[in-house]
Amino acid sequence: MYLVRQLRIKKRKSEQGFVLLMTLFAIMILIAVSYLALTIATQDIKTSGRYYCERRGFSAVDAGLTALCLDFDPNVLVPVSNVQVDPANDSVSKYSYTKPTRNSSTPSIQATRSDLTVGSGYNWVYQLYNGSVSGTGGSGCEMTVDVTLRYGPVNDDPGYR
C-alpha cells in the first residue's frame, strides 16, 4: 500500500509541471496572435492614411488644372506656387503650376471652319502648349501631372497682321 501511495504522489507532481508548461504554451500562442492582429491593424491604418493623403493631393492637382485652364493665355499667364485649394477648411492641400511652353515638336491642330468666328482665307490653327500641375495633400503626398493645352484659334500665316 505504501508503494502505491508513493506512485500517486509522484504522478501528481509530474502533472503539476505539465499544467505549468501548457499554461506557458497558451500564453505564447496568445502573444503571437495579439502581435499578428496588431501588425495587421497598424498596416491598415498606414494604408488608409496614405490613401487619404493621395486623394487630397489628387484633388489639389484637379483644382490647379481647373485654374490653369480657366486662366490660360500664353501671353499673360504667370506660374503660381503653393496656392491653397480651400483656405477656410483645408490649410494643407496646395497646388502649383508652371508656365506652359509652346510645343514646337508637334504640329498645330488645324482649326475647322465651324471653329472660326472671323473671316476665312487664312490658316487658322490651335497651338499646343506643355505644362505641369502639381498638388500636395500633406507631407510626403505630392502628385504631378503633365498636361498639354490647346490655345486658339490663332492665325498661322506669316503675312497676317
Image (cartoon, helix red, strand yellow):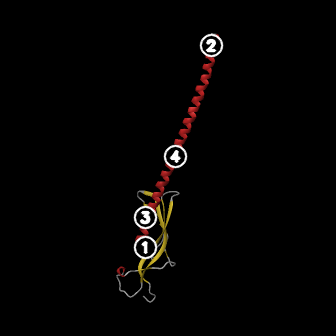
For the residues labelled 3 and 1, the Cα–Cα distance comes to 14 Å
- Can you give x and y, in whole percent of width and height, for residue 121 in the image? 38, 88
Could you say which is closer to the camera, residue 13 or residue 160? 13
| Residue holding disc 3 | 63
Q: What label sits on residue 4 in the rendered view?
A: 2
Answer whether labels 3 and 1 touch (C-beta < 8 Å).
no
| Residue holding disc 4 | 42
Point 55% across, 41% down: residue = 35
Can residue 92 be seen in this snapshot?
no
- Can you give x and y, in whole percent of width and height, for residue 69 in the image? 42, 70
Q: Amino acid at mark 3?
A: Ala
| Residue holding disc 1 | 72
- Closer to the camera: disc 4 or disc 1? 4
Q: Amino acid at mark 1?
A: Phe
User: In terms of sequence position, does the residue under pointer 2 or pointer 3 come before the other?
Assistant: 2
* Helix, strand or loop status at disc 4: helix
